[in-house]
Image: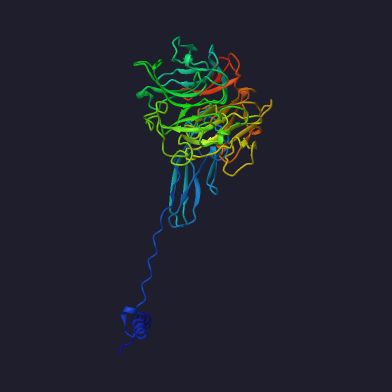
């Protein structure tokens, strides 16, 4: 046998010895061999999943952006800032993954490298294996107007109660309690000598009645139709439909009047007033409880009465073709469709929801419900919450009135007590969620009290269903509404034009626009 060098014996053992031992242990069966180990998967790179852009108003404090990054292998990641951008303007916390302004971001004095109010920040995430991902983030700073005023843009009206933008124009229409709708040019203060519509001969202005509300059709550009809410000469509520004269944007044809809904009114107060269209094209009609102290007949809680409710109807159809006084259809999703209760009802338990409005962003309805003797309230209604019961006359605001509180009653999102203080009043005038660029009231619900003259603003995000913001937390803005002429008082309504500028209507005859203060 030839001599095998010692440095080759190990190799031969591995080549010959191992198969021999395996054969000996396995009885010679190759099918029982141990499987080869699974290959180690390749490392995969992390990825940012948050948006590459962000927008923030100037002077905003606190966290303005939260970045999200993940690793498909579940590895822990380290996040760092890549130098060379505008990162010095921010405090960037990799642990909480948040970005905050290091100092106030001023639109008028931009601190970004390009001076265009777009701040560039690059973030990098790295996994233990060295793979990386980058996020090139652009943060835009928006301009907001820091000073505002109440500019008188119209005067000489007789008991004006409401204002709305006239579609297709830069003008607004102003409703007078006695029954005239007049056209105002806010830029010149000129009132058109020809009325938009005059229903004074068919309107009773006794008590709290009169010409109370107007809503233009969502399809006004093509159907040239609008709706009004008035109390007729019998003192009952009528919702009427009209069309415009052919070729005119400023004159309605009185001959086209069509009464689509009538609600009997037992008294001359608590007639409500506002009407408006939701985003889905349904017409909302808030109604008062019929008058009398404390809702003596219990209409607000009676599901077989239209009083003290939020009604929701479809004016594009007609489910009552044999009834000339009911020219509408019942939309799906109301509170009592197919159940006990009137099918027009969407929500109940209201006293006198005189002024309401839809928020363009959330689609929610904000209801200014005038109180009895102790509390004024603002309610918030989501379009998914049919059947909501706001509690009157069991509750007045958050207080017991004629019964004990119940779990099914929904408290207001804002409320204040009666009195003469800076956070008090006697009669609520509901307002609007302002979405413009005036810093003080941006993204705030703005409203007032007719008697005390207080005007307040509350961040809309603080108005949460199931919670109540009380008067002590309101921001009183009277000092920022100094008028260039006249006096902001006896506020009967707020209103908006087609550019969503916010207006104040004084029943004393003046119309004011809330705008940037003059330099």
For residue 170, above or below residue 48: above
* Image coords of residue 245 (percent x, y): 36, 16
What quarter of the picture does the N terminus occupy?
A: bottom left
For residue 16, above or below residue 81: below
Out of 211 and 81, give the one closest to the viewer.
Answer: 211
Residue 129 in view here = yes
Residue ranking furthest to the top: 193
Drawn side of residue 70 relative to residue 295, left or right = left
For residue 35, above or below residue 245: below
Check the image and tell me how it is coloured.
rainbow
The number of callouts visible is 0
* Image coords of residue 189 (percent x, y): 50, 12
Residue 518 in view here = no
What quarter of the picture does the C terminus occupy?
A: top right
Out of 245 and 416, give the one closest to the viewer.
Answer: 245
* Image coords of residue 308 (percent x, y): 54, 32
* Image coords of residue 300 (percent x, y): 56, 34
């Amino acid at each position: 046998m030839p001599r095998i060098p010692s440095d080759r014996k190990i190799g031969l053992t591995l080549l010959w010895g191992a198969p021999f031992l395996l054969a000996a242990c396995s009885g010679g069966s190759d099918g029982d061999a141990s499987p080869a180990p699974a290959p180690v998967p390749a490392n995969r790179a992390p990825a940012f999943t948050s948006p590459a852009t962000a927008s923030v108003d100037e002077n905003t404090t606190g966290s303005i952006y939260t970045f999200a990054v993940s690793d498909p292998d579940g590895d822990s990641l380290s996040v760092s800032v890549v130098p060379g951008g505008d990162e010095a303007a921010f405090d960037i916390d990799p642990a909480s993954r948040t970005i905050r302004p290091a100092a106030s971001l001023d639109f008028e004095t931009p601190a970004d490298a390009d001076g265009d109010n777009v701040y560039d920040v690059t973030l990098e995430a790295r996994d233990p294996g060295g793979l990386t991902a980058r996020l090139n983030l652009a943060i835009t700073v928006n301009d907001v107007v820091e000073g505002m005023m109440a500019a008188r843009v119209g005067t000489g009206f007789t008991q004006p109660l409401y204002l709305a933008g006239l579609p297709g124009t830069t003008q607004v229409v102003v409703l007078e309690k006695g029954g005239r709708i007049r056209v105002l040019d806010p830029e010149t203060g000129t009132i058109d000598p020809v009325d938009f519509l005059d229903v004074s001969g068919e309107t009773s202005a006794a008590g709290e009645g009169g010409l109370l509300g107007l809503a233009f059709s969502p399809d006004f550009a093509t159907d040239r139709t609008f709706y009004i809410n008035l109390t007729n000469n019998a003192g009952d509520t009528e919702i009427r439909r009209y069309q415009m004269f052919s070729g005119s944007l400023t004159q309605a044809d009185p001959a086209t009047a069509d009464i689509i809904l009538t609600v009997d009114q037992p008294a001359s107060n608590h007639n409500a007033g506002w009407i408006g269209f939701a985003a889905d094209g349904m017409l909302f009609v808030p109604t008062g409880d019929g008058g009398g102290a404390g809702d003596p007949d219990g209409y607000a809680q009676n599901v077989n009465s239209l009083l003290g409710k939020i009604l929701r109807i479809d004016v594009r159809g007609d489910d009552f073709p044999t009834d000339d006084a009911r020219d509408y259809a019942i939309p799906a999703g109301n509170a009592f469709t197919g159940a006990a209760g009137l099918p027009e009802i969407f929500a109940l338990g209201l006293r006198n929801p005189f002024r309401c409005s839809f928020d363009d962003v959330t689609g929610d309805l904000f209801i200014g419900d005038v109180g009895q003797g102790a509390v004024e309230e603002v309610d918030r209604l989501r379009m998914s919450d049919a059947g909501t019961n706001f509690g009157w006359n069991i509750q007045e605001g958050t207080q017991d009135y004629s019964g004990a509180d119940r779990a099914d009653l929904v408290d207001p999102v804002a409320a204040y007590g009666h009195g003469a203080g800076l956070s008090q009043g006697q009669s609520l005038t509901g307002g609007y969620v302002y979405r413009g660029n005036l810093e003080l009231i941006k993204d705030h619900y703005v409203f007032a009290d007719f008697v005390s003259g207080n005007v307040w603003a509350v961040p809309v995000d603080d108005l949460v269903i199931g919670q109540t913001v009380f008067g002590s937390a309101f921001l009183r803005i009277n000092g920022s509404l100094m008028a260039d002429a006249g006096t902001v008082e006896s506020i009967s309504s707020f209103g908006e034009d087609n550019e969503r500028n916010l207006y104040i209507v004084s029943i004393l005859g003046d119309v004011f626009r809330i705008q940037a203060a003059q330099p």
